[in-house]
Image (cartoon, rainbow, N blue to C red):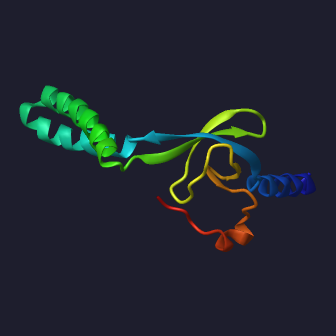
Amino acid sequence: MKKFGILALTIGMLSVGTVNAAEIVREVTSETSGQAAGGMNGMMAGAVGGPIGAVLGAGFGALFGGSGQEALGASERIYLVRTDSGELKEYRSPNYVFADGEKVVIHGNRPRPYGWTPETADSFAYNSR
């Protein structure tokens, strides 16, 4: 029974770092960090008016925080990716820029350039806009 536990642990640890080939479908943007910052600032400013003011301030702050981030062009890159199983998933990519239709490797929760492995990570240059 002890050998079975060791075998299960070994198989589990080996399957954690698996990577999948996928394809970029399109790039979408997200303003969640601007909404979060705006909502917190609005809640603090609205708290002067009591609990109702804090709730209203948080709502208006989130609305204007997201639109402010979009107006500044500071939106986050999110890619809609078709995985090898045919599913469409969204992945954030703060370090790499991809074109539509480009092949990528999903490692953890980030898309990486096709051919990327943890051992060859240093040879891939980061792209930025």
Where's residue 28, x and y in %?
A: 50, 39
Q: Is residue 32 left or right of residue 38?
A: right
Residue 50 lies, with reference to residue 28, above or below; the image says: above
Residue at 74% x, 53% y is 16
Where's residue 38, x and y in %?
A: 25, 42
Q: Nearer the viewer, residue 55 or 81?
A: 81
Q: Is residue 123 left or right of residue 69?
A: right
Residue at 73% x, 45% y is 22
Q: Nearer the viewer, residue 107 or 27?
A: 27
Numbered-mark total: 0
Residue 71 lies, with reference to residue 57, above or below; the image says: below
Q: Is residue 108 left or right of residue 96?
A: right
Residue 6 lies, with reference to residue 41, above or below; the image says: below
Q: Quadrant of residue 89?
A: top right
Q: Nearer the viewer, residue 49 or 96?
A: 96
Residue at 52% x, 44% y is 78
Q: Quadrant of residue 17?
A: bottom right
